[in-house]
Amino acid sequence: EPSQEDLELTRQLLQGAQFLSIPLLDHLILGNGNFTSLRQTTSLWHEFPQGDR
């Protein structure tokens, strides 16, 4: 599970990418032999469109 810090960092990365007009493809959380895609498990990409849809 992503932490609040993970979510805040992702939000900041998305804002920066949007400002620079570059797409942020995903933010992956790795650990214990597993991964979580924040693009697939949060709505952050809807809040900060990246021009890829």
Image (tube, rainbow, N blue to C red):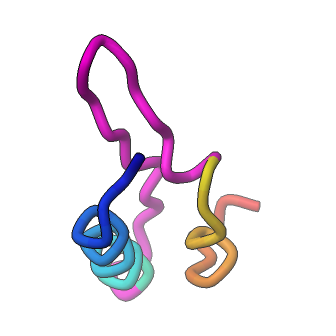
Report the residue that reaches farthest toward the right: 53
Q: Quadrant of the C terminus?
A: bottom right
* Most foreground residue, 9 or 26: 9
Residue 6 at what x, y percent from top left? 28, 62
The residue depicted at 31 percent of the width and 71 percent of the height is: 4
Which quadrant of the structure image shows residue 12?
A: bottom left
Residue 18 at what x, y percent from top left? 44, 81
Give the vertical position of 12 relative to 44 (above or below): below
Please check the rendered image and state whether residue 18 is part of the magenta-colored stretch, yes or no. no
Which quadrant of the structure image shows residue 52?
A: bottom right
The residue depicted at 38 percent of the width and 49 percent of the height is: 27
Residue 10 at what x, y percent from top left? 34, 67
Give the vertical position of 44 relative to 26 (above or below): below
The residue depicted at 36 percent of the width and 40 percent of the height is: 28
Please check the rendered image and state whether residue 27 is part of the magenta-colored stretch, yes or no. yes
Give the vertical position of 20 relative to 29 (above or below): below
* Most foreground residue, 20 or 4: 4
* Most foreground residue, 35 or 13: 35
Q: Tell me: 28 left or right of 23.
A: left
The residue depicted at 40 percent of the width and 74 percent of the height is: 14
Give the vertical position of 32 relative to 39 (above or below): above
Residue 25 at what x, y percent from top left? 48, 49
Q: Which residues are magenta?
A: 19-40
Q: Tell me: 40 left or right of 2.
A: right
